[in-house]
Image (tube, grey):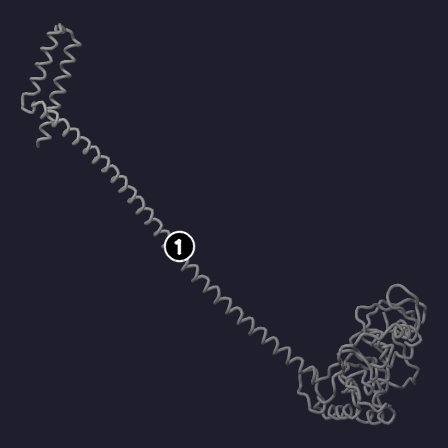
Amino acid sequence: MGGPDGGGDQRPSTGQNVPQWFYQDWAGEHGPRTLLQLTQALQKGYFTPDLLVRKEGTHRWHTLRDVLDLRQLLRARKHVQPAPDAAAGGTPSRTAVSLEAATAASAAALAGISPRRDGSPATATSAAIPVVSLISGSPGAQDDPITNLFRTPGQEWFYVDMHGEVQGPFSSQKMQRWWTNPLYKDHFSSLKCRRGHHGEFRLLPEIAEEVAAKGPPPESPKQLGYKELINLGKQNRESERYVRSGSRKEESDLAKEVEDLKQQVERLEVENEGLRNSQEDTFILRMQVERLLREKAELAREVTMLKREKESLQELLQYAQQFDIADEGVADELIAGEEEWVGEQGLGGSDRATEEWFEELRVASQTVQSGLEDAQA
């Protein structure tokens, strides 16, 4: 799809002997144009000296700086008007390439010391040419209401070409470049355009007037020159170094914190192990204390029983002393007395129950005798 002049660039109506040139920019290859037209565009700041051009009928590309000779630049200087902002008495735009700088650059190119794309060293004269702004625009574009239409990114534009066909969509950046290009501007002013996929096709001045009535356009980004670009690059590199150093410091601090946490965990594990051992020791001591308490209680019960037995034996001894039966034959006398009493009562004989009763009496007598001996001991 061609430029806004309708299906491709048209050949200018010039003499047949004037050499024709093609140039290549961000949008592709354009032309043919005369060398004078390219020179005028260079002086107004729409091109840079490094623009790639080739002569019609050849396939080798050169920079515009290499093609223009000093005589053509000096001749063009007499006919080219100053940039709009300079003519108004203001400070020349940073995007404009001065005629003197371009002339000096062309002279240096003829001397063979111009900066090349093959990596040759650049001269101070050529380095003095300002870099074209990051945002394409012509001198005085900030005051152009139509240029302000194209400053909002993300919009899509359509236009009706000279054959009545709708062309598009195109980005705001591409529309701005076409509008600020002197090779397209006159023809572009008569095109009917539309912003977006819906709406009516109208001339750009009409659209600009409507937008201006609604309110001021959004601020355009600040245009940067060569030195500002270098400073911006330095700031970016310093920021990257700061971020990297900060990241390394954060990683170091994080590693240190992790190591400290590991040491704390190890200390806690040791303390927990000691606590578990202490709890086990406490449990063992408690069991031992309980066992000793049980043994003490058992001994207390045995002492109580012994005291009771002693008291019983003492009572028995007192009883025996009261009846004077403390001698050794007391048991036999008791048994004999019992047998005599049984005989008197007529209970003797071979009755088995009686014999068992007598046996119990003998055992009781022996027990009493044994208790008396223990008491005396």
Identify the residue at horizontal 41%, vertical 58% (top origin).
Answer: 268
Residue reaching furthest to the left: 328
Point out residue 111 in the picture as x, y percentages from the top left corner: 72, 93
Amino acid found under the numbered disc labelled 1: Asn
Determine the residue positioned at 88% across, 92% down. Answer: 79
Image location (x, y in percent) of residue 173: 80, 73
The quarter of the image holding the C terminus is: top left
Compared to residue 236, the image places residue 289 above or below, namely above
Does residue 90 appear to the left or right of 337 in the view shown?
Answer: right
The quadrant in which residue 66 appears is: bottom right
- Provide residue 331's location: percent of width, then percent of height: 8, 20
Above or below, 359 relative to 170? above
- Position of 65 relative to 151 (above/below): below
Q: Is residue 356 above or below residue 3?
A: above
Is disc 1 placed on a helix, strand or loop?
A: helix
**Identity of the residue drawn at 33% across and 49% down:** 282
- Which is nearer the eye, 104 or 250? 250
Residue 313: percent from left, percent from top: 14, 29
Which residue bears the numbered disc 1?
272
